[in-house]
Amino acid sequence: MNKIAGWIFLFLLSTTSYADDGYRLWLKYDLIKDVAKRDDYVRSAQFIVLNGNSQILKSAADELQTGLQGLLGKSVPLIANAGNRTGGIVLTVADAPNADAQTLTSEGYKVLPKQNNIAIVSKTEKGVLYGVFALLRQIQTGQLVNNLSLTSNPKIQYRLLNHWDNTNGTIERGYAGESLWKWYELPATVDPRYRDYARANASLGINGTVVNNVNASARFLTDEYIQKVAALANVFRAYGIRVYLSVYFPAPKTIGGLKTADPLDPEVRKWWADKTKEIYTVIPDFGGFLVKANSEGEPGPQDYGRNHADGANMLANALAPYDGIVIWRAFVYKADSKADRFKAAYEEFTPLDGKFDKKVIVQVKNGPIDFQPREPVSPLFGAMPKTPLAMEFQITQEYTGFATHLVYEAPLFKECLDTDTYAKGKGSPVSKVIDGSLHGYTTTAISGVANTGSDRNWTGNPMAQANWYAFGRLAWDHTLSSEDIAHEWIKMTLTTEPKAVKTITDLMLRSREIYVNYNTPIGLSRPWSGIHFAPEPWLEKSSRPDWTAIYYHRADSIGLGFNRTATGSNALAQYRLEVQQMWNDPETCPLPYLLWYHHIPWIKKLSTGRTLWDELCTRFYTGADSVGWMQQQWAQVKPAVDPEIFADVTGRLITQHKEAIWWRDAWVLYLQQYSRQPIPAPYKKPERTLDDVKRLVDIYQLR
Amino acid sequence: MNKIAGWIFLFLLSTTSYADDGYRLWLKYDLIKDVAKRDDYVRSAQFIVLNGNSQILKSAADELQTGLQGLLGKSVPLIANAGNRTGGIVLTVADAPNADAQTLTSEGYKVLPKQNNIAIVSKTEKGVLYGVFALLRQIQTGQLVNNLSLTSNPKIQYRLLNHWDNTNGTIERGYAGESLWKWYELPATVDPRYRDYARANASLGINGTVVNNVNASARFLTDEYIQKVAALANVFRAYGIRVYLSVYFPAPKTIGGLKTADPLDPEVRKWWADKTKEIYTVIPDFGGFLVKANSEGEPGPQDYGRNHADGANMLANALAPYDGIVIWRAFVYKADSKADRFKAAYEEFTPLDGKFDKKVIVQVKNGPIDFQPREPVSPLFGAMPKTPLAMEFQITQEYTGFATHLVYEAPLFKECLDTDTYAKGKGSPVSKVIDGSLHGYTTTAISGVANTGSDRNWTGNPMAQANWYAFGRLAWDHTLSSEDIAHEWIKMTLTTEPKAVKTITDLMLRSREIYVNYNTPIGLSRPWSGIHFAPEPWLEKSSRPDWTAIYYHRADSIGLGFNRTATGSNALAQYRLEVQQMWNDPETCPLPYLLWYHHIPWIKKLSTGRTLWDELCTRFYTGADSVGWMQQQWAQVKPAVDPEIFADVTGRLITQHKEAIWWRDAWVLYLQQYSRQPIPAPYKKPERTLDDVKRLVDIYQLR
């Protein structure tokens, strides 16, 4: 929504109810209904003082005016100097010696009482912008601002979205419409939505965006497309967001006319240096390159007998004159039915520790396989002390039900961040690896694969907005709890009615575990074919052995699960001893990870007192049933939530319930062929046959 | 926008300016600013009388209330009986003997003064709905409604949109985002936008929609997807719109488990009959099937030694118990470098005239090739007196600049409709073929390949909304002029300021000819590769000979153009003698068709006094320059048009200008290799080389 439309909407909200199309995300700025509370805020927000005239400060002041206009129903004037006035908000970029700016890192901010005004202080304009959003968030969530004193520094330096968006407008693993980026129309037509995208990200502290798919098109390195990307950068810059590009490694051949893309070839190195210079001429604050190389068929330095470090360092060299970085992905594995894909990234990357240029950061997916509903953490975290590692989370719900299933991802992100790697003994969680505090990394980064698209509400499922929000908040501060983040998001987005907030929070917090239960409980993983939608645990053939389902679950007449102990693939050996001990013994291995590491007999009795088979059935059935519980919970909040959003989520939960039963039936009917056990009471055998289930799967595979 | 949101928007519009995101299309219902005029309308719209309670009547009354609320800023009450009251609007479904209903066909309507009320009368509820939209259109375009007397009958029975939308959300030849249909979310989640889609279509009289691509997925014939389609049908029904499906001919094999899809096989026939019954059980007003068979690789009856009539009649047989039709496409051609693709449809279909079941209508693209910016009419029109022929126009701008180029298509549609086929002597235009009046067809239909997508403004380019509008209006009444339609649309959508209306009308009316001039003047055609975006007149190789560019333009050292006279492919012989005479002689053939039928020497002097080469150059250069004129025209209307829409179109015109020059340079530099003539004064040789041009084309072909 552009500014004028935004104002009107706000004006409107003060007088009447309306149907919410979800476009405004968590920046709704609806009028506060509690008059006493509103008056209290009004007293503290009588004017805004803005010193300076930069783009970002202007964005900060604009946002503050727009937000207060909506929340307080009152236009708040912008003035250049407070003089003796009190009861206003003062935005200040403070010099280093300024006492208020002490303890702040460059993008951090303070919101503090000062001379009977609210001061928002930072060393940088970006920090002031973040402070403005923090103050607005306080008001949106109904907290007092009198004597408010906040100090916040981002724990991680580069906080990025990764868009897997293609040149033709499709999004690999996108479930919310087409790409936001209209490449055919750019650079001349600049969709007003780009600005709202930037506002939403800046409100979370996200400071960079990789606009194109990691399966990259070389188009983005042509002059024609650099101009288009620059038009986006021009919009994002005012919100402190830098643009990055995924690069196609053989671009020197495909668009440069060279005979090779060997990273050690002088002509190739010159081509990249020249190209980088060209980019910075047009986009002076360009962020850098993201690279998927020698991975899933994408070309890379290994095609020329070089290694990942050779490739990354060449790009780092090209970026040397500029303030940009290389983000090199560690998502690699070879098609080998004998090998364990789990081990591949560790094997390729740990020998290169210390070999990367200081401008390179290696980006690691949270788990060793691929964004499963639950994975152990990647063994790379803690294993590369000399190489900064970035976290790659997936916000888009590739493996968690597309835009239909409600899965709140903060608990998934937190579970990974909180896992102790024991890299420097107890108290070495993943969060301390990626925030640099464990190994003293000088560069720190975290990326989320975006779930945004051209759908009016950005994310398809309105509840999936919470995942974008949670990623952004955790990228800024990984110590926030899933519950606190949910509270914030609900109050800003759905309702401030306390009982409804609690009900929705419960629903969100349980949602991921419920999904795991009906989808891949007790450490099962990857029961999919290509589209990652329908259950296919029976999948035996694919273009690669590690793209089947049986490769992962290893069901046989004895039992189920992938033996990754010393008697199996020994992937466990990639972890520190303390971690190994946690998972190594099937008797003590926590159930969520059991089948990740062990092949367990069907009739083996687990810690729950049930056999593996009975426990599996229990999870599948209670998981599917729990979606019914989710529906009941959601039904209760009807009076507190906008009717359009309520109806939308209600519809999606119906679909989720149907599909959860589909998953349950697919798994139990398929596995029963191996377990030859009855379905335990009180659960009833599915009414349909395995063939029925497969027939439904087949429908979704028809061209 | 759902109803509540709509109301709010309207309330808003009465008090302040706002930025228009284009979502409301031509149903804006902004408050009329001329107070005297508004008061005049208010006096005629003091109440609405609604007899009846059907879904469609309810939609009609809703729309009238919403529209009047917006236009007049006043809530108009709904009452059950006028009694003695005057100054209201009375909606009446009239019995056949009713004098007011005389001269009306089933979907026609009258708007007439009656007992000091405005009566909207029709034999059907659908007709009343159309009458309501007609009355609103009168008010929206500022015409008087006192003593208004309108009688309108649709000239064509089936007025359809064809969506080339795929199961994965992509749209073949879509340039406005993803598909509107969210198949993964349906049937449980029903996007409020579906209703607004239905409202927009109903406002034009469109009464059917084929929701899936003619390159059809068999998914749509499964129970799973029939339920999804039914959820759409449930929304559309209230607006008189029936749902149709494109069918995959071999579905009896792929989803039915049969060994064949031979249309004469009894099991196959039974399968289709059962499937059709299943569909009608769920969608009682299902419209029927659209079929692309034995065309561009799609399977069909010829795979079993049968012909198009065998295939179509089998489906007609399945539909026999129901009120549904088969629409069988005549878009067929074989990959044969020796043959002339132009002739293929005529050769395959004319021998089948009279062989089709009465439920079958054969759908013919307007031209013999494929939706080119200008084509002669298909020779099939007028050549199938015993077989109802439907018109297939393409609204989406596959060959006319995607969503960036401004091309108003009404003149293209009209040019085809007005062309005389001489099928029954002079005065046998295409319009009379397809409206049934020439041959007494009992079924009449017209289809437009939709340009809608999930973009907020539906069509990407705001100006492309006019093409959806124009198609719908012409489908109802092909005698309307391009100019009148443009006037209506502009006033309802952009501005009522008279000078701006005139300026925009001029711009729109000239736009198609300008596009032809820089793209494919004097009868050139199809200079594209697969994506139909960038110029590629040099294209020599493709997976099929008729998918190259040289197949069509036949440039050589002597001249340019495809000889389709008796000394060439003799395609001209497929037309009536009078038509042949119009085009047969290169000396008298109108220039727009010259190279469609003749190979003309470069140095041949044309009727303009210029040689072919000089005329070509003149067209390319003036065409590209005219986009500059379009930009100037558009710049003039700035004060009269919403700022967001103004900026959007301004941006697209910049892109169009750049690409028009690209087209110009591509053609002149390429053809100059054959003509070996200088570029005539006053035009300047392009600054770039043919290699430069090709390099830019290559960029848009990179994966």
Image (cartoon, coloured by chain):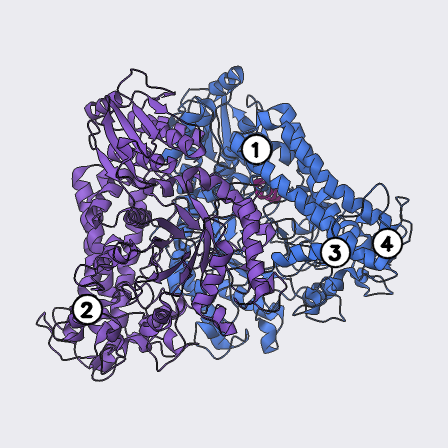
Chain colours: A purple, B blue
Q: Residue at x 15, y 68 (%)?
A: A590
Assess whether residue B474 is covered by the magenta stretch. yes
> Residue at the location (29% across, 34% down)?
A101
The first of marks 3 and 4 along the sequence is: 4
Q: Which mark is residue B574?
A: none
Q: Position of residue B246 (x, y in %)?
A: 52, 60
Element class at badge 1: helix
Tell me whether the residue at label 1 lies in contact with that at label 3, contact meaning CB atoms closer than 8 angstroms. no
Q: Which residue is mark 1?
A: B646
Q: Are marks 1 and 3 on the same chain?
A: yes
Tag on residue A579? Answer: 2
Q: Mark 2 packing: few (<14 Cα in 10 Å), some, or many (20+)?
A: some
Instruction: Quadrant for the C terminus of chain B, please.
Output: bottom right
Query: Helix, strand, or loop for circle 3?
Result: helix
**Tag in front: 3 or 2:** 2
The crowd level at tag 3 (other Cα within 10 Å; few <14, some 14-19, many 20+) is some
Q: Look at the picture and state if B366 lies above or below A36.
A: below
The residue beneath circle 4 is B581
* Magenta stretch: helix, strand or loop mostly: helix
Q: Quadrant of the N terminus of chain B?
A: top left
Precedes in sequence: disc 1 or disc 3: 1
Dot 2: what SS?
Answer: helix
Q: Do discs 3 and 2 share a chain? A: no
Subunit of label 3: B
Q: Is residue B482 above or below residue A114?
A: below
Crowd class of label 1 (few under 14; some 14 to 19; many from 20; radius 10 Å): some
Q: Which range of residues does the magenta coloring cover?
A: B465-475
